[in-house]
Image (cartoon, coloured by chain):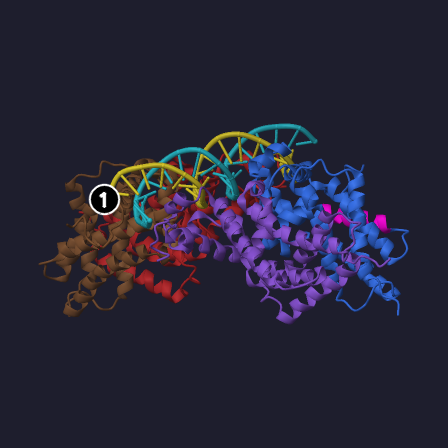
Chain colours: A purple, B blue, C brown, D red, E cyan, F yellow
DNA sequence: CATGAATGAGTGTTCATTCAT
DNA sequence: TATGAATGAACACTCATTCAT
């Protein structure tokens, strides 16, 4: 039903192309990916891609938006039922690290590819990305309000520091095709981030 | 005499090409830079670039290596006469932030361009980069030895967190051609990083 | 129906390119022929040649193979109904001489161009060439079996001598754009070859 | 004395270039040889080659002329003291086969490279080559006069057949870097040529 | 909706050639 | 006589893009 429903859903090829790009991004540099590579991987005629996407960056951003929105949902879901800013923060960090290992393409787009293109910052992909960041902002602001987190530092700075710590920790797994550190190792890395950052975040008791 | 010395130094053009790339990188994405752009900027024949560098990525890596080695020296110099791991760390962070603003090309190469290329990790540029990181490692290890810094966390993880925090803090200045935040703002950001990270790094008193 | 048959035949351009090369080879040295020359002659986009043939030598070898296989058929046809090794040999020589005049491109490829390229000897063109030589070998071996041709000389040496005699006789016509000697002259040359070689080939009566 | 004599002999470099080309021709196709290859092999500045030679073909032809004139002398010397057209012819064939093995570059130039260039036929190299052929013509004509060789065939045709037989017999050694057949094998090939050609050349007794 | 064929503008690369020293 | 540096024009090759079917 979903398939044949009136609301004309995009044809199969549209999605095959997105999937193909995701697969390719795991293999190589975006700038090395050509129309023909993508067409071949998607098992679709190269000319057809034009019907759906203006250019390759466009495919990239659409894919990026889609995966990032997925990610937002996952995180939202993961945070449910958790109380306390620091517990949420720990979960956030933990999800992000594990997630990157599970969806390398997404990570590569976020950390390595998208930023390099100016047009990214005007794309819906960037919007999605901001939505993701706002999840983190929510946690921080809540923590400040509840008095758990110190209030003498600019929230934006805090966010960048946390994200930077997370991103840089994930970097090796994205760059090298490390068969992604074991779960244990990832847990340890998440733990280290928390141990390092939480003391500085805590509102010091009067 | 210096000019006529035996050690045949590279011809002028060799360096003009490096300078030209540095200028271009500040303007645009590396992947958008073409041989002809570079040749024009360097006021040099395009074929000549080929003679010296074989391909564009090579120019990138040579430039990256050179600037990174410069940076190593600057940091080494900046750290002289400073006592205590935390004081050194604060200086390190401070230099790095200010430095990035002063040499945007260098920052863009490090954070946005180089990593995207597999061959980077086999290049001398990567070696230089490791040398830079080892400066930070030195500070951390020294601090652990003197008992200033806690010894229950993997040094590599610590390093990544610190670098990530720094990098992500610099990111906006690199991405958008912000007329680079005022000195005051940078000082504030450096301060925030320290305030956030230092408590977690300190060896807690028994 | 032939046109619309299932077996997807190569597009027209594929063959136009071959024809164009054949024409060009009659005019000039292969090493002087450029992609653009060929494209212009074939009235085809230069990039298209690349799609079908990868490089110019490849076009050369494909053309060579094709024409040589044609030649094999012509010779096989021409030899039909002829009895006796020497009669066949005479016919073989005669065909070859006349043929070279009629298809100068083919001769130039065989005698002047192909051999100069190492890769030729790994190409299907070389295989075709061997097929052609084996026609001559068949005649010789048959003659030896029937006792017409002496059996005290290595067949390979005999073949080379005969081919060499033929080739060198054709050479002037190929090198200079002689409006190819009259039929009479060619007949005379064929005759000379036979007169010179046959006595030495005959098995001497006890 | 020779070196510093008044008759200004060409400078060393002039000859080094020739030697270098000879060495290169043994290694690869002439059309693959570049100015820089030659300069490197000769251990001479590329620009210098211009002083002596107009272009690469020019070097080729000068070298060709030189080696061919050497060859003429060798053959003339080798024929001395031999009586009878057939004995001379046998010697001629024998020298030529052995010689090719000893000087592969020369053979490659004659059989594979020079002919492909139109300008060859206007060069002194071609003149030298004709001188060489005239040695063979001399033998044939002498044989006709003395009544040893039949007089009913065009001398030019005869010459081509003999040369063709010789050339084609040498071909494999030139094409493939066969460690040149043993002396025995070459002797056998020379013998085969004689056995095949001589009967047809002999004037038949009334 | 989908494709094979074709195109042309752009890009990297090569290399003979010149020139100041 | 000899060289290193530099050049420019030609050339091969790539690839996004269009179009008839």
- Dividing the picture into quadrants, the one containing residue A162 is bottom right
Chain letter of disc 1?
C
Asked whether B22 falls inside the magenta stretch, the response is no
**Residue D79 appears in the rendering:** no
In the image shown, does D91 or B142 lie closer to the viewer? Answer: B142
User: With B52 as the anchor, is B80 left or right in this view?
Assistant: right
* Residue at the far front in the pictured view: A146
User: With D75 as the anchor, is A142 left or right in this view?
Assistant: right
Quadrant position of the C terminus of chain B in the picture: bottom right
- The residue wearing badge 1 is C103
In the image shown, does D189 or A57 lie closer to the viewer? Answer: A57
In the image shown, does A10 or C147 lie closer to the viewer? Answer: A10
Percent across and percent down for residue B100 are: 73, 44
Tell me which residue sits at (25%, 47%) in the image. Answer: C169
Tell me which residue sits at (28%, 59%) in the image. Answer: C130
Percent across and percent down for residue A168 are: 67, 56
**Residue C49 appears in the rendering:** yes
Percent across and percent down for residue C114 are: 34, 50
């Amino acid at each position: 039903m979903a398939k044949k429903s009136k609301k004309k859903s995009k044809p199969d090829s549209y999605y095959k192309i997105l999937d193909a790009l995701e697969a390719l991004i795991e293999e190589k540099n975006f700038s090395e990916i050509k129309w023909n590579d993508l067409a071949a991987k998607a098992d679709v005629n190269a000319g057809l891609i034009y019907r759906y996407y203006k250019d390759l960056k466009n495919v990239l951003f659409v894919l990026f938006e889609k995966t990032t929105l997925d990610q937002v949902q996952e995180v939202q879901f993961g945070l449910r039922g958790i109380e306390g800013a620091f517990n949420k923060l720990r979960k956030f960090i933990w999800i992000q690290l594990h997630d990157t290992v599970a969806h390398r393409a997404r990570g590569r787009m976020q950390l390595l590819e998208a930023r390099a293109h100016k047009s990214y910052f005007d794309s819906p992909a960037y919007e999605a990305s901001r939505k993701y960041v706002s999840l983190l902002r929510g946690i921080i602001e809540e923590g400040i309000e509840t008095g758990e987190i110190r209030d003498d530092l600019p929230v934006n700075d805090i966010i960048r520091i946390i994200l930077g710590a997370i991103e840089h920790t994930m970097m090796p797994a994205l760059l090298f095709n490390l068969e992604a550190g074991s779960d244990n190792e990832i847990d340890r890395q998440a733990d280290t981030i928390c141990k390092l950052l939480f003391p500085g975040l805590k509102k010091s008791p009067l």
